[in-house]
Amino acid sequence: MISKYIRNNALFVILVIVLLLLLVKIAMDHFGDASTTEHYVGLSKVDRFVDMMEKKYTKVDRDAKTVTQCIKKKNYQGSAEERDMYGLPKIESEDTNCQTISYKYHFNKEDAIKLVKDKIATSQLLMDAGLPVPKFFKFVFGPTMDNIMIQEKLLEQMNQAGITFPIVLKQIYGTFGIDVFTHIKDIEMAGKTLEEMRNKGYKEVMCEEQIEGHCYRIFVFNGQIMDVIRRSAPFVVGDGVNTIRSLIDMRNKRQLEKKLFETKNVTESFIADQGYKMDDILPKGRNVTISTVINMHNGADIERIPLGSIPEINRNIFIQANQVLGIKCSGIDFLSPDITKSYKENNGRILEINGTPDTEIHTIVSEQSGDNFDIYAKIAANVF
Ligand SMILES: Nc1ncnc2c1ncn2[C@@H]1O[C@H](COP(=O)(O)OP(=O)(O)O)[C@@H](O)[C@H]1O
Ligand SMILES: [Mg+2]
C-alpha cells in the first residue's frame, strides 16, 4: 500500500517535472524569438516564400531556416586545339561551390537587428556617413529635475543642436508609433509631453526636428530596392452636414469594408491646430488631417511608387544606409514631401531603419491595386 503510494507519487512528480520542462522550452523558444524580432509577418513564417526558395535553390532546411545554393564551376582546361596540342584530357573538371545563409531573422544578423532598434545609435551612424537624418539629440531625465529644469535643459539642447519648434519626442527603442509625439509646437507642450513620458517610466527619450511630408516605406534587400510604398496621413473631407467625429467613423467603416485599417489613434490637438473640434460640422470640401501617426495600421492611405520614378540620388542613400548598418534586409522609413525629387531639394530625411520589416504592407497594396507585384517572389529571386 505504502510502496504503491510512493510509486504513484513518484510518477506524479516525474510527470510534473516533464511538464515543467516542456513549458520552459516553449517559453524559451517564444522569448528567444521575441528578444530579437517583433510582431510582424516574418519571412521565415511565410510558407509560400519558403516554397519559392526551395524551387529556386539547391536546398532549404526548414528547421534550421537556412538556404543553400551550390554552383558548379567549370575549370578552364584550354580550348580543343590547346588540349590536343598539350595532350590534355577531353573532360573538363568541375568544382562545386556552396553557400548557405540563414533566413531566420529576415536574413539579418541578430547584432544588426539590435543596432537598428536603437534609433539614436542608428541616426548617429547614418549622420556620420553623410546620410540625411533629422537633427536629433538624446534627452536624459535627471533624478531630481522639476518641470522648469526639464524645460530649460530641453531648450538648451535644442539650441545646441540647432533645432526649432515644432519638434518630435519619442522613445528610443519604439515600434508601431507607440509613444511618438509629433507636432510639439512650443516649450509648454514639450514640458507636458516630457513629464508624461517620464511618468510612463522613460529615463531617456529622443528629440528630433519635425520633418514634413509623407512617410515612405522602402524595402531594401541584398543591395537592391525591392519596393516603395507611400503612406499619407489619413484625412476626412467635410460635407457641410457631418461632424468630424462622424466623418472619422464613416471613414473607418469604409476602411474596414476595403479590408484596410481604422484610424484609432486620432490626434485631437492636431485637429485643433487646423481650427476644429471633434464635434464641429466640417464645411463642405474642407480637408482635415485626423492623425499625425502615419502608418498603415493607423489607417494611413497607402500607394505603390514606381521605382523608376525615384531619382538615383535618393536610391543611393537607401542602399548606403543598409551598407553602413551592416543589414541585408530592411524597411526604411523616409520622410519627404515627394520621393520623386532629390532629398537635397525638398529636405527628405531617413527616419529609421526596421530590421524585421513588415511585408504585409507590400502584399496589401498589391491586393488593393490589383497589380501583380509579389514582394516574396522578388526577394526569393535575389537571395544570393
Ligand atoms: N522627426 C519626425 N518628423 C516627422 N514625423 C515623425 C518624426 N519622427 C516620427 N514621425 C512620425 O511618427 C511615426 C513613427 O515614428 P518612427 O520613428 O518611425 O517610430 P516607430 O518605430 O514607432 O515606427 C513616423 O512614421 C512618422 O509619421
Ligand atoms: Mg517607423
Image: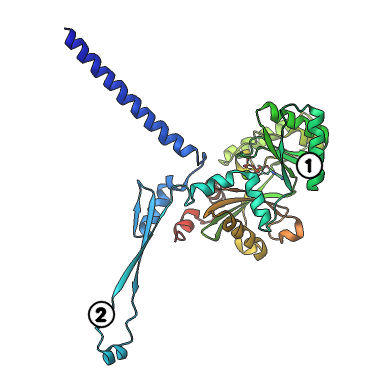
Q: Is residue 57 left or right of residue 351?
A: left
Amino acid of disc 1: Gln
Marked residue nearer the N-terminal end (1 or 2): 2
| Colour basis | rainbow
Along the line of sight, the residue nearer the viewer: 214 or 9: 9
Horizontally, residue 359 falls left or right of residue 77, namely: right
Write down which quadrant ligand 2 falls in.
Answer: top right
User: Does mark 1 have its CB less than 8 Å from ligand 1?
Assistant: no
Furthest toward the top, the residue is 1
Mark carried by residue 91: 2
Q: Residues within 10 Å of mark 1 (few under 14, many from 20)?
A: some
Question: Residue 58, relative to residue 50: is it above or below?
Answer: below
Whether 318 is drawn above or below 40: the answer is below
Q: In which quadrant will I find the C terminus?
A: bottom left
Left or right, 345 with reference to 119: right
Q: Amino acid at mark 2?
A: Ile
> Which residue is under mark 1?
157
The residue depicted at 25 percent of the width and 83 percent of the height is 90
Q: CA distance from mark 1 to mark 2?
A: 72 Å
In the picture, residue 296 is in which quadrant?
top right
Say the numbered circle drawn on residue 328: none
Q: Nearer the viewer, mark 1 or mark 2?
A: 1
Q: State the count of labels.
A: 2
Element on which disc 1 rests: helix
Taking the spot 28% from the left edge, 76% from the top edge, the residue there is 93
